[in-house]
Image (tube, grey):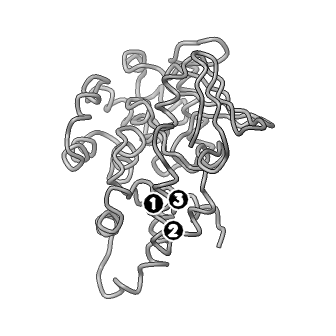
Amino acid sequence: MKYQIKTDKYIQIFGKDDFLPADILECGQIFSYKKNEDTWEVFSKDKFAKIEENENGFLILTNDTTYFEIFFDLKTDYGKIKQKLSEFEILKKPILFGHGIRILKQDLFETLISFIVSANNNIKRIQLILGRIREKYGTKIGNFYAFPTREQLLGASAEDFAQLGAGYRAPYLWKVLRQIDEKTLHDWSDLPTAELRKNLIALAGIGPKVADCVLLFGFGRKDVFPVDTWIEKMFFKYYGKQFENRPLNREKIRHILTGEFGFLSGYAQQYLFYFMRSGVE
């Protein structure tokens, strides 16, 4: 994919084959965004970008082009990834449907908190809760609120989180803030995926699926395959007959799928998840 950077002004994306805002932002990997009539607003950490369509493709308007070049994973050739994954029959339709997906490289701390909030929750409610957390504890920058730092959130009690709508996740948020900090998360970046996954699952409010989401969307580990209800449905639809005599739980399904797709697992998961959730056949 071709793109051009105008330092601290914009990134021009040429073409629409490997970059579509709707596919990128609505495929379940991020919650801090807003869709307007003809533009998209994206919030990450203390950064902001607006995406608008033009005759050449899409324009990413931001004063931090370096950050969003990494955030949108612009240097990765998704054409080659889609070509490789299209060798799997079950991925041909999902890739056509979600051809504009790019897996975002999000801030580790924000991703951790966001996906704890996401557990057994719907996207509109997740966005509402995270928006309230930003407004109450984050720093206002222009017309938006930055995602609060750990230090800012340490002032919140479990009851405070509950009042913002976090529900049963409120005590998990309070506890995890006392178990981990931003520096430790960044230090974990050098760990093997299996060890890093164990460390994440040991934290409050983080089960296997949430851990895999943090690994994929925060740490950029593409050898993971988050399994939720939609992926479970996909698995039994396409793989069920092969394993009908074996007792399967989500952990076993995850193991089978990562064995199938290897270091392309994260990409495969996003195309399949987005396709299955859409209801398109």
The three-letter code of the residue at mark 1 reads Ala
Q: In the rendered view of the protein, which quadrant contains the C terminus?
A: bottom right
Residue contact at pointers 1 and 2, CB within 8 angstroms: yes
In front: 65, or 133?
65
For label 3, the SS is helix
Q: Which residue is mark 1?
A: 268
Residue displayed at 40% across by 47% down: 213
Q: Quadrant of residue 135?
A: top right
Dot 1 or dot 2, earlier in sequence: 2
132 relative to 266, above or below: above
Q: Quadrant of residue 31?
A: top right
109 relative to 101, above or below: above
236 relative to 225, above or below: below
Q: In the rendered view of the protein, which quadrant contains the N terminus?
A: top right
Residue 271 image label? 3
In front: 57, or 225?
57
Number of labelled discs?
A: 3
The three-letter code of the residue at mark 2 reads Leu
Dot 3 or dot 2, earlier in sequence: 2
Q: Quadrant of residue 21?
A: top right
Residue displayed at 49% across by 33% down: 71
Q: CA distance from mark 1 to mark 3?
A: 5 Å
Residue 49 location in percent, x, y? 62, 25
Residue 91 image label? 2
221 relative to 90, above or below: above
